[in-house]
Each structure stands twice: as C-alpha cells, then as structure tokens.
Amino acid sequence: MIEIDKVLKRLGVQANNSGVSTGLKCIEGSGDILESFSPVDGRKIAGVSSADGDDYELVIKKAQDAFGKWKLIPSPARGEIVRQMGEQFRLYKQDLGTLVSYEMGKSLQEGLGEVQEMIDICDFAVGLSRQLYGLTMHSERVNHRMYEQWHPLGVVGIISAFNFPVAVWSWNAMLALVCGNVCVWKPSEKTPLAALACQNIIRKVLEQSEVPEGVSSVMIGGKDLGELLAGDTRIALVSATGSTRMGKSVAETVGRRLGRSLLELGGNNAVIVTPSADLKIAIPGIVFGAVGTAGQRCTSTRRVIIHTDIFEEVKGKLIGAYRQLRIGNPLDENVHVGPLIDKAAVKSYEDATKRIQEAGGTLLTEYAVLSGPGFESGCYVVPCIAVVENHFPIVQQETFAPILYLIPYTDLEEAIALQNAVPQGLSSAIFTLNVRESEAFLSQVGSDCGIANVNIGTSGAEIGGAFGGEKETGGGRESGSDSWKAYMRRQTSTINYGESLPLAQGIKFEIE
Ligand code: UN1
C-alpha cells in the first residue's frame, strides 16, 4: 500500500501548514485553522491556517505589484517559465496524483490523469505563448492600417472545486500566466493540501526564474474569500468552478461592478443510445461516465436516454456491469469506485434515492451507504441505477453522486428534446452507427450543450478543446482552442500613415 506520509513529506505538506502563499513566500494565515480529512479512511491529514481579510489584502497588493512587472516580460519568456512548471509536474506526477486521490477520494488512475491534464495544459500554454494572434483588417480609408492586439487583463482570481482540486486551477492559471496576468487561487476548502502541494511544486521554478513575488498566489479559506474576490474591482477576471448556486452569486457580484467572470458550473449530462449503437463501447462509456470520480465530475453521465426497442437489453447490461463494480480504497488499483467527498455528499445521495421513489421512479439496483472494515469514513456509497421520467424535479438537478437515470424514447427528435430539457448544458453524447442520427444530434437543432460527443461518453474531455457549457452551466470556456481570449483584453487600433484625415463612413468635416 502507498505510504501517504512519505508522499506528503515529498510534497512539502506538514502537520500544520501556512494557508497563504505568494509564490515565493509562505505566510501564516490569521484566520481559522482548517482541517483536511481524507474521505478514504477518515483520517485527519493536516491542518492549514486559513486567510483572513488582512491576508487577502496583502495577497492582492502583492499580485498587483507583480502584474506591473510580469506583463512586461515577453510572452514566450513567460511560456518558458510555464514549461518549467510542466517539467516539475512531470517529476511529481505520482506523488501529486496520490495526494489528489487520498484527499479527494477519486481513484489513483484518475488522480494521475488529473495531473496529466496539468502537464498537458502546460505544454499547450507554452505553444500558445507564441500564438496570441490578433487579426488585421482592411481599413476603408486610404493610407490607413487597422489591426487588433491582445493585452493581459491584470489579476485573475481562480475559485476551484474539490472534484478537480488541481487540474482546473492549471487550465486557468497556465493560460492566464502566458497571457501576462497574475493569478490568485482560492481552492476548495475541502482540498487545501493538494493546492498547497501545487504551490510547493512550482515554487522552485518561480524562485529560479526570478519572477516577482505574487505572480501565482494561493489563499486557503471558505466562501468569504470567494466573495471578496467577486466584489473586488482590482480582480479583472473571476474564474469560478462549482455549483450553479455558487456561480449565480459570483456572477451577480461581479456583474454589479461590470467585471468579467468565467463560469464553469453544474452539468446534467445525458447519453442517447440508439437502436444501432455498438453496445460493446456504449456500456463501458456510460458506466465510466456515471461512476468515475464516484459521479462527482461536472461531466458525469447522469441520464441515459434509450430507444424503447433496446431499453430492456441496455438496462440488463448496465445492471450486469454495476454488479461487477468494486467499491473501496481508491488507492487500490483494482477498485473502480472510491468514496464521496464527505458525509454531506452521502446525505445528498440518500436524499436523492428517496426523492426518486417519492416521484414514482424505480431503483433497479442496490443503493446503500457502506459500513464496516474499509468503510469507516462513512463516505462510501453503492452506485445505483433508476428508471425515471425526465421532468422529475430530482432528475432536473445535479446530484454529485453515482446515481444514473434511465429514460426511454421512441424517436430521435424526442430523445434530443429530452436531452435538452434540463436547466444545465455542459456535456452530451450519442451512441449510434447511423450517420443521419449523429449529424442530427450535432446540428443546430441537436444537443444544446457545450460538449456533444459521438460514440464516446460525456466525461473525460481532452484539454485541447474549449471546455464549458451553456445555460446554467454558465457559458464559460476554459482550457484549449481559443479559450485564452477570456484572459485578455482586445484592443483595436487604426493607424493613419497618410497626409490627410479621411473620416470613416465618408463623413465630410471641413475646417480652414
Ligand atoms: C469537472 O468535473 O469540473 O471532462 C471537470 C472531464 C475532465 C474535467 C472535468 N477533463 O471529465
């Protein structure tokens, strides 16, 4: 078994940690001591001194000062620093992946996968640092040149969730940094140690590159810190990942000051299974999507919309697959499903199973909270499947737990309508071998989600694409493609190199 204490030591996590870091310096937070418990075995891993209002002020002042210097460094030179961070993440992949798994509860494979996403986004950001392209336009005026360029925004606040405790920060931070911004990260208070470990990993690079203090800071604390970021006019962009409720509050506060926000909120992702689907790939795709990370991804598969001709067959195969699932310590590589993050999450799983039945749904598999040896933390639940109707209130909301809803359909138009008939719009998928069906699903009258996949599941998006969703998912796009534009301001410039002053739109304005 992995020796957690050695992993913590190599990552610089101690029994008591300073919860504020400006990249170069660790500062004892003056707020409450926050304790991080592992949902794997219930052990208290370590304590962290959280940031209070004064610590917040200090971090933001350092960040502002740092921005003045960081933005003057050429973007490819900033990219070189991000490249070195990626190298460090490669070196610490095993340890950081293990800590993510132990502190958050996802399987070790998924913990390592998360760190791989960090490495990949670093590589992406390095290339991007030489490709922050603006367009040139043809001016309608003679001897004029018109073009656009992209400038950094300033201080970027990053609020991240427990379920991807490190990768989501890196998607934001690595892009923001090459774009010339500085970052202040408020990670979930449920996973502070993984965040502090990241900060320890990049510190060496920051020191050796002689970057100013405050380029990449972290502050550990609760929702009050998030509210400070949202309301602070010095924060040019607030990028927030979490529940729709949290996102609405951030959006309102940031909107009131006409600031910018980038929101990555709840999903309610469906897979459509058509009569021609290749069930050899559909079943594992659905099961991984539903039980991976114990159903706590924003991209987790929550609903399966199945054609009535194959409903019984798919249902039977899913029940068979669920019987094979091994639940237990996520650090054991033979285990498929680890614990939920905490007892509050277990309660919402239990409440959901009740509400399904009250609404008239049928639970098809065992649903239970596990106890006994190996399950002492009280956070382990059995993934379950239920037949429901799409309009049930419990089905309309995102429950961060491994509960999979089956819904029958008779024609594709109906299936797409059902898939879209939820408030969220993050990820979606169709399993079909029929090109007409897949193209309809991908067309403008198809899926209304930010992600629409064919013959793969709803989760596990690659970093190269723009990641995010519509409706109550918040509309933000992070990670690949041209998501970097959210971290920069666009400036359009028109230059007159002639000897007269022609006005646009042919307007004449003559004075002696
Ligand atoms: C999230 O759950 O907040 O697509 C992010 C995926 C991962 C990221 C999920 N690459 O499942």
Image: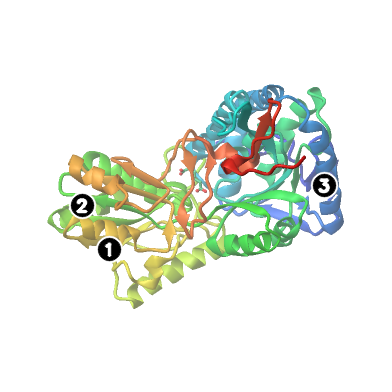
Q: Secondary structure at mark 2?
A: helix
Looking at marks 2 and 3 on the same chain, the residue that comes earlier in the sequence is marked by 3
Q: Which residue is mark 2?
A: 314
- How far is mark 2 from mark 3, CA to CA? 53 Å
Asked whether the viewer can see residue 179, the reply is yes
Classify residue 230 as left or right of residue 90.
right
Amino acid type, label 3: Val
Classify residue 50 as left or right of residue 406.
right
In x, y percent, where is residue 126? 61, 25
Which quadrant would the N terminus be assigned to in this image? top right
In x, y percent, where is residue 265? 52, 55
Between 490 and 357, which is closer to the camera in this rendering?
490
Task: Report the disc number at residue 164.
Answer: none
* Residue count near mark 2 (Cα–Cα under 10 Å), binned few <14, some 14–19, many ≥20: many
In x, y percent, where is residue 73? 76, 26
- How far is mark 1 from mark 2, CA to CA? 13 Å
- How far is mark 1 from mark 3, CA to CA? 51 Å
How many numbered tags mark residues here?
A: 3
Which quadrant would the C terminus be assigned to in this image? top right
Looking at marks 1 and 2 on the same chain, the residue that comes earlier in the sequence is marked by 2
Please identify, in this view, whether the residue under mark 1 or under mark 2 is nearer the observer. Answer: 2
Q: Which residue is mark 1?
A: 364
Amino acid type, label 1: Leu
The quadrant holding residue 208 is: top right
Q: Which residue is mark 3?
A: 59
Which residue appears farthest toward the left when viewing the image? 309
